[in-house]
Amino acid sequence: MKPLRRTYFDVTQDRRPRLMSAIDRRLESIGAVEWPLDFDQMDAAGGKADVDAELAAAINDIWEQRSDVAARLGLTRQAFDQEMISQGVKDAIQEALVYDYATMLNFKAFGQKTFYFSENLVERLANTELNVAAAMVVPPFRACLFVLDDDISRNALYAIHGKPAPAPTGEPISVFVTVRPRAGGGRTLSMMIWHADDKRSRMFVKRELLLADGARVENALKTDWATILPPDQVWVDEAPFYNDGFRFFRIVVNGILYLGSSSPDVSGELRAEDRIPAPAMGMSAKGRRHLEHKKATSTRLPYIEVGGVVRPLGSPAGQSSKSRVEVRLLVRGHWKSQVHGPGMTLRKLIHVEPYWRGPEMAELVDRPYLVK
């Protein structure tokens, strides 16, 4: 397993301490919540004036740091302010903070459950069809965090905006997942996705799926809100999400299905501080700095590893050399809903994993060729 890297939750704790303190106070005043709250519900539950004041304080925290930014750009703070205000930066900051506020409040309200998906499992999930009913998509908690730290996920995320993924720099992708009942029936699955470190946010994506009653997951992944909501409530063109971005959301939704399947591979809670040794007697200054760096770049959240013992996707062991298939083909995985229990009234989800079909690579390479 890779190091337990800092998530966007860790970044927000350090970037926005006053905002996080305000969230803690808000949770104390609201008490236990049955379902994740959207921002309008937070206004109603916590008092709109208080919430607005908390956001305003957080904006001021950010705005007070602008002197450093202006200096790096060779501008006076007055010139920088005029330029930023003319570009609507303060409004953009407030919009971003609304997402931070709502996401972190829901995550904390439901126990800060964090699932780290291994690279080998992600490879399988990316190659598994979504062939089950949307009713089977039930996150393990009504709000939780998925952590993805692999090239497949990075490439799939940046493909949404047609960009190449940056070289790995240490920060994983944080996917905050929430599910809510929908007034008109069905449920809404919300994914708030950040790729960020302490200095900057590299990518932010917000996506909601309609898990309609009787629908299939394939249809849910292509939710087009322009055909569901009034025009004044549609803010984003959804097409990139179910074209270039389809692979990324396939990984996330298959991750939810995997956690709800009959035999998921999950660990107990893992804590970074338990994996970093204390400085030994006589340790060099360089060694101590190394341990401090590991501690500073590790999450404070307990991780639950998913797919830690899953092997890399490859040819099945003992594949017959008599196969008539002349080319190696990847057979996509799928889900099987199997009946069981008293009177065969229950169903359990079974993951039929993807696999390679065809001759082994050595067989292809060693094949004799006739040269004329």
Image (cartoon, rainbow, N blue to C red):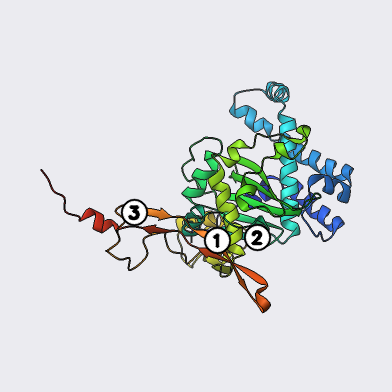
Compared across the picture, whether 20 is left or right of 201 comes to right
Q: Position of residue 192 (x, y in %)?
A: 66, 47
Q: Which residue is mark 2?
A: 136
- The reply to whether callout 2 and callout 1 are in contact (CB within 8 Å) is yes
Q: What amino acid type should be assigned to the residue bearing mark 2?
A: Met
Circle 1 SS class: strand
Q: Is residue 251 visible?
A: yes
Packing grade of label 2 (10 A; few <14, some 14-19, many >=20) is: some
Instruction: Choose the circle earlier in sequence order: 3 or 1.
Output: 3
Q: Position of residue 311 (x, y in %)?
A: 43, 63
Q: Residue at x 59, y 41 (%)?
A: 242
> What is the quadrant of the C terminus in the image?
top left
Q: Position of residue 232 (x, y in %)?
A: 78, 32
Q: What amino acid type should be assigned to the residue bearing mark 3?
A: Arg
Q: Which residue is mark 3?
A: 328
Q: Position of residue 217 (x, y in %)?
A: 62, 52
Q: Which residue is mark 1?
A: 335
Q: What amino acid type should be assigned to the residue bearing mark 1?
A: Trp
Mark 3 vs mark 1, CA separation in Å: 23 Å
Q: Nearer the viewer, residue 356 or 119?
A: 356
